Amino acid sequence: MTTADPTQPSAWHCLGPLQRIPEGLSQATVGQSRLCLVRHGPLIAALDDQCVHAGAPLSAGWLRGGQIVCPWHRFRYEWSTGRADYPPGSPAQPVHPVRVRDGLVFVRI
């Protein structure tokens, strides 16, 4: 369960302590939004979990360098920007702003 950050607009939601978010890919739910979280050490990103191509759960994919590889059709997205790398001309994956404050991770939906 997430809670709103009282010091930020209501669109920011707390996902909990950074230490509790596993390295690599994981999934989180904020209201009706399913998110694919990517953690690489102190860096964290949040993308829509549903692949824009065919609806696959990106959190079930894998990381290759700075990219998430979709588990169904192998589409590749840069996890920091959502930019599609393969196949050429594919739409970007929506990315949500993330910030870490006092060891807590907040995502804006």
Image (spheres, rainbow, N blue to C red):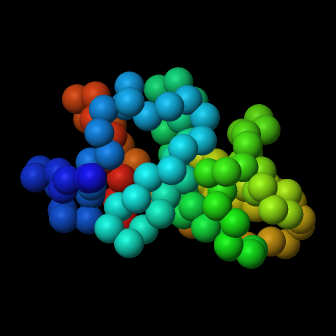
Residue 94 image point, x, y percent: 57, 66
From the viewer's side, name the closer residue of 98 and 21: 21
Residue 17 image point, x, y percent: 30, 32
Residue 56 image point, x, y percent: 70, 66
Residue shown at the point (51%, 50%) measured from the top left: 27
The answer to whether residue 20 shows anywhere in this view is yes
Toward which corner of the image does residue 11 lie, by quadrant?
A: bottom left
From the viewer's side, name the closer residue of 55 and 97: 55
Residue shown at the point (78%, 55%) measured from the top left: 71
The answer to whether residue 43 shows anywhere in this view is no
Query: Would residue 96 appear left or right of 52 to someone viewing this image?
Result: left
Furthest residue in direction left, as rendered: 6
Query: Would residue 33 appear left or right of 57 to someone viewing this image?
Result: left
Residue shown at the point (76%, 57%) measured from the top left: 70
Residue shown at the point (26%, 48%) measured from the top left: 14
Residue 53 against residue 76 in the figure, above or below: below
Residue 69 against residue 10 in the figure, above or below: above
Quadrant containing the C terminus is bottom left
How many numbered circles are shown? 0
Residue 59 against residue 57 in the figure, above or below: above
Query: Would residue 88 appear left or right of 101 to someone viewing this image?
Result: right
